[in-house]
């Protein structure tokens, strides 16, 4: 590596390290009760408008379900919030004070927004407990755990999260041996241990048994309050079991919003999504 390349690498490394220190000071201002502001958002791909002047507000501590047909813009919206995709126009604020469009994807994760994709990604060759230990070690708030053993307080926190996720009896088991549903819960637990203020969860019950779906519903509703939770899901029975408020997307914009009963009774929603 040339000296120039070494300097460039050091600059990137120092930026990441310094940001991890500063991120603790970046606390979202939720004095108005809202954790996420998405306003006038639009983005196009090769002439196709995936998001079209979309407005969305998530209250601090709420559990919100987002539904809509394929191509409605659900994944693109999540990509924009987490910094994976940049919009053409509009704004996305974490609290009133943090402009998410100014940060990179890893920085947004450090600020306090966690995302779980549909397919679980865990460290299969490690135990359930070690998965949370590794997740915690990557958290800006416990950076020293990369270089030292966990404290008793950190071990207790991991155990408490595993208890909440229904995995405490499997803490020593290799993650590869877990069922599909258990891997989903483990990945959610790995996010929770990093203490995000906002959790974005994509199709958490795909491929689950009814019993696993019930336990997932219990887990997500239990997380709401301490965390704000946004769930993107196609299974209407599951949405109905957890929904406090539902947002329906269609053609990149908000089609309807309200309780599950209100959304289901909306004639436009019935026509374009529910097939009534």
Image (cartoon, rainbow, N blue to C red):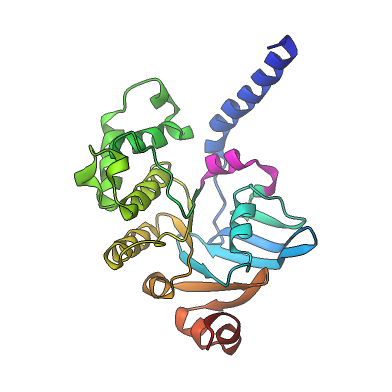
Choose top left, top right, bottom left or bottom right for residue 269. bottom right
Determine whether 136 is above or below 263 in the image: above
Choose top left, top right, bottom left or bottom right for residue 175. top left
Asked if one can make out residue 99 in the rendered structure from this viewpoint, the answer is no
Query: Which residues, given as a range, are shown in magenta?
Result: 101-113
In the image, residue 110 lies in the stretch drawn in magenta? yes
Q: Position of residue 197 (x, y in %)?
A: 48, 50
In the image, residue 172 lies in the stretch drawn in magenta? no
Q: Position of residue 39 (x, y in %)?
A: 69, 63
Q: Nearer the viewer, residue 134 or 34?
A: 134
Residue at the outermost top position: 3
| For residue 59, side relative to residue 255 (left or right) | left
| For residue 129, side relative to residue 274 (left or right) | left
Main SS category, magenta section: helix
Choose top left, top right, bottom left or bottom right for residue 256. bottom right
Residue at the outermost left position: 169
Q: Position of residue 138 (x, y in %)?
A: 46, 33
Determine whether 166 is above or below 273 in the image: above
Residue found 32% across the figure and 23% down from its top? 149
């Amino acid at each position: 590596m040339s000296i120039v390349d070494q300097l460039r690498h050091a600059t990137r490394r120092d930026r990441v390290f310094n940001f991890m220190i500063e991120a603790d000071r970046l606390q979202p201002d939720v004095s108005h009760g809202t954790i996420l502001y998405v306003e006038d958002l639009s983005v196009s791909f090769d002439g196709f408008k995936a998001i079209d002047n979309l407005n969305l507000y998530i209250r601090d501590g709420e559990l919100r379900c987002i539904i809509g047909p394929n191509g409605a813009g659900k994944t693109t919206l999540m990509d924009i919030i987490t910094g994976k995709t940049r919009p053409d126009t509009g704004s996305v604020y974490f609290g009133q004070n943090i402009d998410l469009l100014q940060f990179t994807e890893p920085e947004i994760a450090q600020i306090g927004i966690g995302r779980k994709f549909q397919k679980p990604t865990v460290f299969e060759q490690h135990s359930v407990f070690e998965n949370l230990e590794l997740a915690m070690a990557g958290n800006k708030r416990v950076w020293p755990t990369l270089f030292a053993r966990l404290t008793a307080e950190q071990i207790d926190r991991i155990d408490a999260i595993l208890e909440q996720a229904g995995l405490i009896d499997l803490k020593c088991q290799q993650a590869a041996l877990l069922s599909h549903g258990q891997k989903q819960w483990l990945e959610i637990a790995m996010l929770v241990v990093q203490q995000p203020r906002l959790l974005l969860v994509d199709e958490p019950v795909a491929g689950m048994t009814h019993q696993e779906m019930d336990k997932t519903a219990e887990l997500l509703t239990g997380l709401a309050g301490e965390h704000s939770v946004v769930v993107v899901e196609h299974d209407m029975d599951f949405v109905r079991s957890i929904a406090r408020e539902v947002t329906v997307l269609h053609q990149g914009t908000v089609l309807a919003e309200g309780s599950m009963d209100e959304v289901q009774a909306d004639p436009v929603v019935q026509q374009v999504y529910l097939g009534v």
